[in-house]
Amino acid sequence: MKELMLYLHVPFCVRKCNYCDFLSAVHPEETRERYVEALCAEVRARGKEYSGRTVTSIFFGGGTPSLLLPAQIFGIMDVIRETFQVAPDAEITMECNPGTVKMTGRSDVERRQVDLDSERRQRDLDDKERQGNIAEKERLAGYLKAGINRLSIGLQSANDEELQLLGRIHDFDAFQKTYQAARAAGFTNVSIDLMNALPGQTLDSWKETLEKVLTLKPMPEHLSVYSLILEEGTRFFAWDGEGKFTGKLQIPSEELDREMYAHTGKRLREAGFEQYEISNYAREGWECRHNFGYWTRKEYLGLGLGSASLLDETRYSNETNFGKYLKDPLAGRTAQPLGRKEQMEEFLFLGLRTCRGVKRKEFLESFGESLDQYWQAVIDKNVADGLLLDDGEGIRLTAKGMDLSNYVSAQFLLDE
């Protein structure tokens, strides 16, 4: 059976972070419950369209999926299992923000019986949730029982001043409590998200963040490290336009950004992490299968508001209007079939993000033609410039090439 990955979008947050341009917003509990109902309806309907495939990974992204209660995650997971064939060893990830997993008890609306075979489990969770404040460990254990086996915690920085500037709802101490609660609940696969090149950030403050993360016990299995990008429509973008990022809040230069990136790779290698993609590092055997599937163009089905899919060489995009999605979660979906040229370009762009790079044999098997037939001159030029390595079997970015990955990738665009 063909493999299929599932992505489920949870478009809720406690408040919008100052740098965030993701499709998410603040919504009350009642609206969140209505969204879960719409999402489950979409899962059932799409499952009929894409049956005959084995689901090998599931990813709850956002927004802040950890705003959903364990019973709601139970409900969604039960619908997925009823609808799709899920591999016994499927990787099932949920993004989690510190400060959201220790919330107050459920409202009457949220106590709705979620339609499934999970009445007893939901009743057990309800009994705990009625008590008011749910301990983080109990709530996280609820996610684990629902089937989540990988947690991705959004820390971003270990510096409280930087966290405040980012608009996060937690400090480093709150993160540490959430991290230890996740371990106590039984999670053995935990990833942490970090962000550098922040306004006012220095190389020393970035090094301090890395060191604090590396002293966690047990050490995380995976780290995702991204440089800040000022996205249009965010508070940061507006503040930059107003000239607020000057003096002590100056945004790091490209040179400092690259210095942070180089230090990150070196320090994480020393700590036992291997870089396997431009922004991702893992201890041996703990690479994120779901994200690696994106970079190798495995098929995935996006479910929920604004979700994207890649199926049968067609890219789909879900409805982005929240009200319209609640009314009909199947309406408003758009399709963009990919031509052969676009497929080959994607194969190169995405493959070059990984440290293994692009293999000639895999390109030949996918397209029936040689990689060098299209890009020999581009490859030779970038090898000469020290941006690509060519070992005969394939090509991959050098350390310098990773710094200039957008520049390198743009050269692989094919003429019309």
Image (spheres, rainbow, N blue to C red):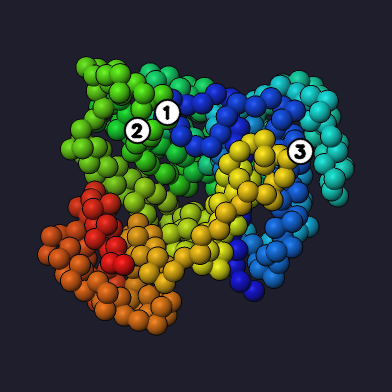
In the picture of the structure, the residue carrying the numbered disc 1 is 234
Would you call the spot at circle 2 few (<14 residues within 10 Å), some (14-19), or many (20 or more)?
Answer: some
Left or right, residue 164 beside residue 37: left
Q: Secondary structure at mark 2?
A: loop
Task: Please give the name of the residue rendered at 59% of the width and 49% of the height, measured from the top-left corner.
Answer: 318
Please state which amino acid type lies under the numbered disc 3: Ala
Please state which amino acid type lies under the numbered disc 1: Thr
Give the alpha-carbon distance from disc 3 to disc 1, as whole Å: 33 Å
Left or right, residue 277 beside residue 299: left
Task: Please give the name of the residue rendered at 75% of the width and 55% of the height, measured from the top-left corner.
Answer: 44
Quadrant of the image for the N terminus?
Answer: bottom right
In the picture of the structure, the residue carrying the numbered disc 3 is 71
Mark 2 vs 3: CB contact within 8 A: no
Q: Earlier in the sequence, mark 2 or mark 3?
A: 3
Would you call the spot at circle 1 few (<14 residues within 10 Å), some (14-19), or many (20 or more)?
Answer: some
Quadrant of the image for the C terminus?
Answer: bottom left
In the picture of the structure, the residue carrying the numbered disc 2 is 230
